[in-house]
Amino acid sequence: MRKLALVIVLLFLISGCFWGNNQNLEQPLEPKPQPQEIIEGEKIVEITIASVGDIMVHSRQFEAAYDPQTKMYNFENNFTLIKDYIKLADIAIANLETTFGGEERGYSGYPRFNTPDTMADALKYAGFDVVSTINNHTMDTGIKGMFRTIEVLKSRGLTPIGTRESLEDKSYIIKEIKGINVGITAYSYETPSTNGMKTLNGILIPKEYTELFDTFNYQQLERDLEKIQKRIENMREEGAEIIVFVVHWGSEYQRSYDKFQKEIGEKLNSFGVDLIFGSHPHVIQPIKTIEGENGHTTMVAYSLGNFISNQRYEFLNNRYTEDGIVVYATYQKNLKTGEISLKETAYLPTWVNRYRVNGRWVYEVIPVFQALQNKEAYNLTNTDSIERAKISLNNTVNWIKEHNTDIKQIID
């Protein structure tokens, strides 16, 4: 990877290319050096916001991460080959579809996820800044697990959104990056209520903690959209110039978005949301631009697929669950006029390479196009993995091209 300043990286983005950047993010969301360029006498700054899809940890994954000699779990290798592409962004977001409920509860995969805390260390190592903690698995280890998950993330310098520890806290963030205020909030669908109580995956949320979860109910969508609109308005009043909405929605394993996603996306556009990153279907769904009647434009990635999981073809008979994308949106601000515009969008196809070393499974997220160009460097060495990687790349690229001709693929 070439070590270039971010401004050079973003200039390459114009042609649909990135060069890697090995810069380490020591503090989450702290402003990086401010590359600026002069365009016709105006000072322009740029920031790049990126997101990946679901971070899932099935039992085979944490078993693979266990070192019997140290008796510790280490997930860093999951992200070693992808982290340079995460660190291209000024703000990198992920959806954590597991909990850190603690070792004493016993680690577990589906259907109630409880993952070793060291996955949080690995997310920090990978270059993520913001982690959505609201989805249908948020209550997998109960209310104590929800609180503990927030604590673990914060202790690693990661910023959780979507859940909070008290009503005095905010479950969203507004952060200044290079003179641009970015607001990020996250919501998830609820499962049907029981005796008037909210549920996630059928697990009751205690009434006294209901307001600590940012959720909406498909059966009471109009009411909940009003609450979301108020959240967006509050973020604007607090100075957010770009609003990013991370949302857990849609139908699992469906490659097309459903009527609720379409309706919610259009409503969010009318509320002034600029960027929507979707998760939950576990497969990649289309990336679209919504042009509102009020002239506002919203880019929506309906589902980013799985970033890492054990949802593989041999278990689900579904190749698409192995695929993911990193989506990048680059905004620029004219510091003289204050005008902000979306300059460029790009995507990076990813795939989870799973192979054995000395009888033990290894899981690695790889940038699949780049890996196929340099197989040995990305540990893509057996015939089956190579063929599956090719299938993954073709599926992803063709699907994105079919539904969006503007977004560019990162090929460097």
Image (spheres, grey):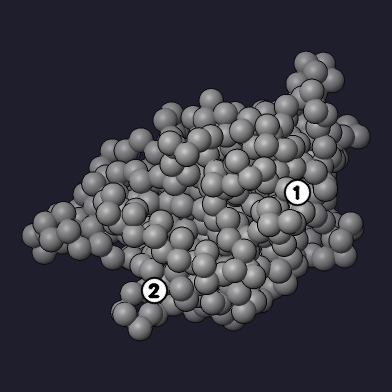
**Percent x, y of residue 315:** 89, 57
Left/right placement of residue 238 relative to residue 163 reads: left
Is residue 248 shown above or below 8? below
Residue at the spot x=39%, y=60% of the render?
230
Left/right placement of residue 228 relative to residue 296 reads: right
| Number of the label disc, if any, that sits on residue 270 | 2
Q: Furthest residue to the bottom?
A: 293
Residue at the spot x=57%, y=69% of the render?
221
Left/right placement of residue 190 relative to residue 321 reads: left
The kind of residue on which mark 1 rests is Ile
**Real-space CA distance between mark 1 and mark 2, rounded to the nearest whole angstrom:** 32 Å
Q: Between residues 301 and 88, which one lies in front from this camera angle?
A: 301
Q: Between residues 174 and 301, which one lies in front from this camera angle?
A: 174
User: Which residue bears the numbered disc 1?
Assistant: 203
**Percent x, y of residue 176:** 30, 44
The kind of residue on which mark 2 rests is Ser
